[in-house]
Image (cartoon, rainbow, N blue to C red):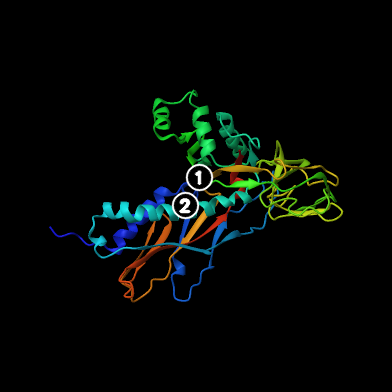
């Protein structure tokens, strides 16, 4: 019986399946597909806008108290076009799909999935909630439960869509640390076979290992920092002094700080959680010759109203504390609800006059394959592309687990 020639559509569908199976952190987040960019003249850098839900306050009175509805959205820029380029011949297209997949697609898609995942884990820099002890690898149920507790305090839904992604060291320590923990026999068996925590563990739909978990280096801070001038409602900057003089890289984007007397509040009932509010530094900060520094932070501070997130605004001369030791590296494992982050992909234009081409969408991810004959070298260069962008949509739905 004659061999069946593999079509570009068959190849691409198999490539997408392999890509999805290789994604780790990405599997824990939303994937948004936007078909409107595959039109003539569309340029890389186009933006998808994701609408955020409205928030209101409750009035306990018979008198009507109306509130304005303010629609908010976040833009996801599709700035990254990544591809894997390979050569394969017409003869290789006569292989059965399994052989073609093992020889060509699996190694190619593993590299592409790794690149997408690695870009996504950088979003830890947007997350302000953090638990764990800097310099101590998470190794117990308490570490996992601490992430869940912080997410509970931030009113993150318990809807089965919470996920935790950890680095290899944390994965190994957690599997070992929980080996004597009461578990169903099937869960213990799975952990023994796979060497990973797996699904439905301590309130998380999945605890996955990912080699792409980032390591954060804390800024070279020093001194006795204090707030310099009380903050105002809606501020996203903390003015400060008392730092070491003229330090470049005093704080780094992704550093977490707290301010004395400023506590986090539950976003639903606006009660203090009893934990100091954590702010993440959004850009690198230097101190001046007098030890002063202006610190851009997230989230924006609100001490009242529908968006209240702190018990009080930072007061003048309140002490500032930086998490971790200056200049030290720590892995940042990531717990999140699926809605915390978004990977957006869009259709790329289909070129004409090529040997073959196809474009497919699978489970929220769009991919394109193009092959063309090169008469100069008698080869068939082929490229498999994805156009994508990452965005933190709800940082309050995520929590870092420092190691």
Say if 188 sits above or below 219 in the image: above
The residue under the point 49% across, 23% down is: 180
Q: At 48% from the left edge and 76% from the top edge, which residue is drawn?
A: 41
User: Is disc 1 placed on a helix, strand or loop?
Assistant: loop
Closer to the camera, 95 or 179?
Answer: 95
Q: Residues within 10 Å of mark 1 (few under 14, many from 20)?
A: some
Q: Of 286 and 306, which appears nearest the observer?
A: 286
> Horizontal and vertical percent for residue 237?
76, 54
Q: Residues within 10 Å of mark 2 (few under 14, many from 20)?
A: many
CB atoms of marks 2 and 1 within 8 Å: yes
Residue located farthest toward the left when viewing the structure as drawn: 1
Can I make out residue 278 in this image?
yes
Spot occupied by residue 151 in the image (x, y as percentages of width and height): 60, 39
For residue 114, which numbered disc appears in the image?
2
Name the residue at 50% across, 28% down: 176
Q: Quadrant of the N terminus?
A: bottom left
Quadrant that contains the C terminus: top right
Residue 6 shows in the view: no
Residue 108 percent coordinates (x, y): 39, 56
Q: Which comes before the other along the chain, label 2 or label 1?
A: 2
Give the residue number, with chain letter if any, for mark 1: 211
What kind of element bears circle 2? helix
């Amino acid at each position: 019986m004659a061999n069946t020639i593999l079509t570009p559509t068959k190849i691409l569908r198999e490539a997408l399946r392999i890509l999805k199976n290789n994604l780790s952190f990405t599997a824990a987040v939303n994937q948004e597909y936007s078909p409107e960019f595959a039109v003539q003249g569309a340029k890389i850098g186009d933006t998808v806008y994701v609408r955020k839900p409205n928030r209101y306050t409750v009035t306990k009175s018979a008198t009507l108290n109306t509130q304005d509805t303010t629609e908010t959205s976040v833009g996801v820029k599709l700035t990254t076009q990544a591809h894997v380029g390979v050569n394969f011949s017409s003869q290789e297209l006569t292989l059965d799909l399994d052989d073609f997949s093992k020889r060509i697609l699996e190694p190619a898609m593993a590299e592409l999935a790794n690149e997408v995942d690695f870009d996504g884990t950088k979003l830890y820099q947007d997350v302000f909630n953090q638990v764990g002890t800097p310099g101590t690898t998470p190794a117990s149920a308490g570490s996992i439960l601490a992430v869940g507790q912080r997410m509970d305090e931030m009113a993150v839904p318990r809807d089965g869509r919470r996920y935790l992604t950890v680095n290899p060291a944390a994965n190994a320590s957690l599997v070992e640390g929980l080996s004597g923990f009461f578990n169903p026999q099937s869960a213990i068996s799975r952990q023994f076979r796979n060497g990973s925590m797996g699904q439905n563990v301590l309130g998380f739909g999945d605890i996955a290992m990912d080699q792409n978990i980032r390591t954060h280096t804390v800024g070279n801070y020093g001194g006795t920092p204090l707030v310099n001038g009380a903050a105002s409602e809606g501020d996203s900057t903390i003015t400060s002094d008392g730092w070491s003089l003229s330090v470049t890289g005093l704080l780094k984007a992704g550093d977490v700080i707290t301010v004395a007397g400023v506590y986090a509040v539950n976003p639903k009932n606006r009660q203090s959680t009893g934990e100091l509010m954590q702010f993440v530094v959004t850009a690198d900060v230097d101190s001046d010759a007098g030890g002063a520094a202006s610190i851009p932070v997230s989230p924006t501070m609100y001490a009242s109203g529908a968006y209240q997130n702190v018990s009080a605004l930072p007061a003048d001369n309140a002490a500032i504390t930086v998490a971790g030791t200056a200049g030290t590296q720590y892995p940042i494992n990531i717990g999140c609800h699926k809605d915390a982050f978004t990977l957006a992909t869009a259709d790329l234009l289909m070129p004409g006059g090529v040997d073959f081409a196809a474009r497919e969408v699978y489970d929220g991810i769009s991919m394109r394959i193009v092959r063309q004959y090169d008469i100069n070298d008698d080869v068939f260069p082929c490229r498999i592309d994805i156009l994508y962008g990452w965005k933190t949509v709800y940082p309050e739905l995520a929590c870092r687990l420092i190691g």
